[in-house]
Image (cartoon, grey):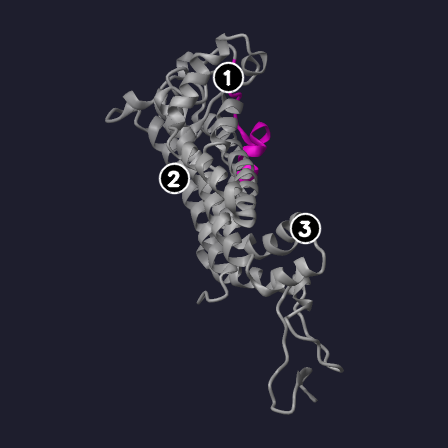
Amino acid sequence: MKTTGGLNEDVTGEVVTRPVGEAAMLEGRAPVAGVAYNEPTAAAQWRLVLRRFLRHRVAVVALVVLGVIFLAVMFAGQFAPYHLNPNPLPLLEANHGPSGAHWVGTDELGRDQLTRILYAGRLSLTIGLSVAIFSTIIGTAIGAMAGYFGGWVDQFLMRITDLFLIVPAIAIIAIAQKGLQHTSFPIVGVLSSSTLIIVILSFLFWQTIGRVVRGLFLSIKEKEFVEAARASGASSWRVMFRHILPNIIGPIAVNTTLVVGAAIILESTLSFLGFGVQPPQVSLGTMLSQSESAVGTSTAYLIFYPGLFLLIVVLCVNFVGDGMRDAFDPQSTH
């Protein structure tokens, strides 16, 4: 046994390494006396992921743009040049094109479009982020249980997943808004339209990540370090969430970013069709819906700027997701 450059080598010159992770202390053989095993720390792994992400220039630029947009919409009350719904309405300024006073023009009621875009962007981003977080938690939990326990648990949870896959979101939201709010269920009546969309979409967006997590659990649970954790007396829940789950953070994080964009698009589509956010709340979809008659007219800016804002947000989210995918992929060329 000799040491060269800080690495331990046996008499054949082979470098002695071990897998990353707490449960990797057992590799199926007894440790060699006198050998100092080198294990990368969690901090080193995250630094490596960050380094890969920073090499993805498009993703970095998209993250910066997304950060600026996020700050602007979350502090819309401070950045917006006018009130969202001024009283009285400045009807004399209705349908004025972009100018120094109103950078992206005014709508048919004289309200400033930039102000409305900022508030609408805040609501759309809130819906997108909330749906992404809640659906990821639900999908990860269900996929982890299905993949780890297998058997009838797997079959039962996957049949539930198949059931949710065939349920159209627009039908659920339409029924909830037009029917349930007029019934005797008190909790439904107090939900705002945006909250109702978050709740429903969260239960309709978890299937993809659930299937991904299930497949990864089916593969990883057969690894040696998982068998070693079981042999050491670790409970099933500890093995699932302490040993297996940290190894699939990459796919989960990437899926979360993709769900943000998909949820924003679906919310905008539902609002455009009249089944989404309801007044007095405003979202990008409602702005597009209210301005559909402006296409091909002198007020086409009413639909152009909200659509452009929506496009930029979704593209930035997708680019960030691409960067995260490459950062968590050890075989990435970036």
Q: Is residue 264 above or below residue 113?
A: below
Numbered tag placed on residue 311 in the rendering: 2
Confirm whether the magenta stretch covers residue 78: yes
Local secondary structure at mark 2 = helix
Q: Judge whether 52 appears above or below 99 on screen.
A: below
Q: Residue at x 41, y 15 (%)?
A: 109
Circle 3 residues within 10 Å: few <14, some 14–19, many ≥20? some
Along the polypeptide, which appears first: circle 3 or circle 2?
A: 3
Q: Give residue 140's position: percent from left, percent from top.
A: 54, 44
The residue lying toward the viewer, choosing from 252 and 126, is 252
* Residue 211: x %, y % from top left: 46, 45
Label annotation for residue 85: 1
Q: Residue at x 56, y 53 (%)?
A: 249
The Cα atoms of the two marked residues, 3 and 2, are separated by 42 Å
- In the rendered image, which residue does mark 3 sit on? 238
The span picked out in magenta is 70-86
Observer able to see residue 3: yes
Which residue ends up furthest to the front in the rendered image? 152
Q: Is residue 43 left or right of residue 52?
A: right
- Mark 2 surroundings within 10 Å by alpha-carbon count, few (fewer than 14), some (14 through 19), many (20 or more): few
* Foreground: disc 2 or disc 1: 2
Q: Secondary structure at mark 1?
A: loop
- The mark found on residue 178 in the picture is none
In this view, the residue in front, 47 or 62, is 47
The kind of residue on which mark 1 rests is Asn
Farthest-out residue, bottom: 11
Q: Nearer the viewer, mark 3 or mark 1?
A: 3
Q: What's the residue at 58%, 11% (across, down)?
A: 186
